[in-house]
Amino acid sequence: MKTEILALEHKNLLFKKLKKDTKIAEYSFANIYLFRDTHKYEVLFLDNLIFIKGYSYDGMSYIMPVSDLNEIGDNVFNDLLNHVDLIFPIDENWLGKFNNKGYVIEYKDGDTDYVYEIEKLRTFAGKKLHSKRNLLHQFEKNYICEALPLFGERLIEAKEVLEKWQEESNQPKEDTDYKACLEALNLYDELILCGYIYYIDKKPAGFIIGEELCYDTFALHFAKGLVEYKGIYQFMFNSFAKILPEKYKFVNFEQDLDKENLRLAKKSYEPDILLKKYRIKK
């Protein structure tokens, strides 16, 4: 068994292997790389198998499978669980690998990803999204907003938005995702990210960054808008959903980390799937 601290040099090894048939946001090299310090990520090599070793937000040590689960024997998982608290995150569709084998299988609400049908974000249709629709219409009435692909010199302007957003948050940088978002902008091409930046009166006012998770799901890693423009988040989500290629049916807004403000914000968009991430332990 050998471990290496997760680094950008591991991208070529891990990028394709992490692309699994799951909508879980962690199965993305950009995601694990950008939050490597938070989770103390390492790459673990065991014979011809590869795992990510890290720590959850509630301090539990875990192993995340990178190699195909079908290639990993029960004896390997049993042995790994002598060294860490959990095998995590496991998709519900993969539980057959662990059922009826003496494992404890559970999940935490704070780990759960919020997944939305793209058509919902394109329309904000229905009574439950009436307030979102109103905010969108107010924004469109008050502002003329231009959406442009995020790349090149526009990344510098996105950093300006990020700095203002951080100031407006009234929180220490350590308590927000400022550092990870800044690094995403600095390593935008290397991490194979994509997004849009939004201008009002030719001034940058917000941006979105994400990537493909699997064949029908796009992960929204970062969305930053300036509070002076009421309704900008509703506009960005609506606009970006309309821009995404038709192949994508879902957008993953990721987890709420057990933070009440994030939970309320994400629930307010009426998720279509509350995607549980299972924890396997002895």
Image (cartoon, rainbow, N blue to C red):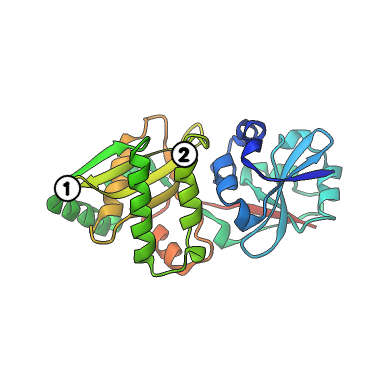
Q: Is residue 15 left or right of residue 200?
A: right
Numbered badge on residue 188: 2
Instruction: Pick out the residue farthest to the left.
Output: 141
Cα gap from disc 1 to disc 2, whole angstroms:
25 Å
Q: Where is residue 260 drawn, in percent x and y?
A: 46, 68
Residue beneath the point at 65% across and 43% down: 7
Q: What SS does tag 2 mark? A: loop
Q: Which numbered disc flags the more N-terminal residue, 1 or 2?
A: 2
Q: Is residue 172 above or below residue 104?
A: below
Q: Where is residue 62 drawn, in percent x and y?
A: 72, 54
Q: Where is residue 253 drawn, in percent x and y?
A: 45, 50
| Nearest the eye: 127 or 198 | 198
Quarter of the image with the N terminus is: top right
| Nearest the eye: 60 or 93 | 60
Q: Is residue 232 left or right of residue 48?
A: left
Numbered badge on residue 12: none
Mark 1, residue position: 201
Q: Is residue 11 left or right of residue 203?
A: right
Q: Is residue 265 above or below residue 251?
A: below
Q: Residues within 10 Å of mark 1 (few under 14, many from 20)?
A: few
Q: Residues within 10 Å of mark 2 (few under 14, many from 20)?
A: many
Amino acid bearing label 2: Tyr
Q: Is residue 169 left or right of residue 17?
A: left
Residue 268 in sight from this viewpoint: no
Q: Is residue 215 above or below residue 61?
A: above
